[in-house]
Image: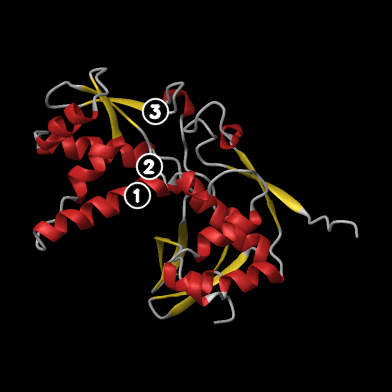
Amino acid sequence: MEENKFPTETVELPSKGVVYPSDHPLRSGKVEMKYMTAKEEDILTNQNYIKKGIVLDKLLESLTMGKFDIKELITGDKNALLISSRILGYGKDYTFSYDGTEYTVDLTKLENKPFDETKATHKGTFAFTLPATGTKVEFKLLNDKDNETIDQENESMKKFNKEASSEVTIRLKHQIVSIEGDNDKNNIRAFVEQMLAQDSRALRKHIKDISPDINLSTSVKINGVEESIDVPISLSFFWPDL
């Protein structure tokens, strides 16, 4: 029996692929995705996947045509693929409720945030000079694998002190890859522990500002006044009939 040929679309990644290694399939900056079928609806209603919190990963694994690990996607690129998945599954119009009023947004009108790929190194990392101390740091953008490691480390820390949260420092320890050219992990961890608050805040803001992503902002009228809000991603995003 001849294999079914599903129609596909090419999705442009917000990162343009420059944050991935040169030999990585995502380096092209594009991902081919097929249209959603009943098979993907089975995935979306799989209670086991939902309980484990992996339902969206399983959905993307089924829809993307390239050979890569979904968990290697940085957050912004994954968001773009989820938006595309929704469009390919249930169409471009998404109706949501905000402040008691229903609004409909055309998801195809959402654009990628401006991103200057020339700022990335050949390794897919970025440089930043801390404003207070003048220290030059090199950092990477995090993917789901990194975030899982960070969450596990943070939970381990809480076992020693339930009231403590070390998420900021743990995240920076994993995100910074070198300090003044020194990539020793122990030295990076020691540096982060002593980093000035203003440097930490400046670095985190810079990372947020330059991180590629899809812009979820849309304009709505609230009490006759035009306001900008982010399109909410809830259960109804993939289950439009709920």
* Residue that protrudes farthest toward the top in the picture: 181
Is residue 1 left or right of 165 when viewed as pictured? right
Q: Judging from the image, what secondary structure is the residue with disc 3 in?
A: loop
Most foreground residue, 109 or 20: 20
Residue 224: % across, % down: 41, 71
Q: Look at mark 3 in the image and give the residue it sits on.
A: 125
> Residue at (12%, 27%) from the top-left corner?
132
Q: Can residue 168 be seen at all in this image of the molecule?
A: yes
Q: Quadrant for the C terminus, please.
A: bottom right
Most foreground residue, 50 or 208: 50
Q: How is the image coloured?
A: secondary structure
Q: Look at mark 2 in the image and give the residue it sits on.
A: 142
Q: Look at mark 1 in the image and give the residue it sits on.
A: 147
The image quarter containing residue 98 is: bottom left
Earlier-in-chain disc, 2 versus 3: 3
Most foreground residue, 109 or 125: 125
Tags 2 and 1 in contact by the CB under 8 Å rule?
Answer: yes
Q: Can residue 103 be seen at all in this image of the molecule?
A: no
> The disc labelled 1 sits on which kind of residue?
Asn
Residue 163: % across, % down: 9, 62
- Badge 3 crowding class, 10 Å Cα cut-off, few under 14, some 14 to 19, many 20 or more, is some
**Mark 2 and mark 3: span between their CA atoms?**
10 Å
**Mark 3 and mark 1: span between their CA atoms?**
17 Å
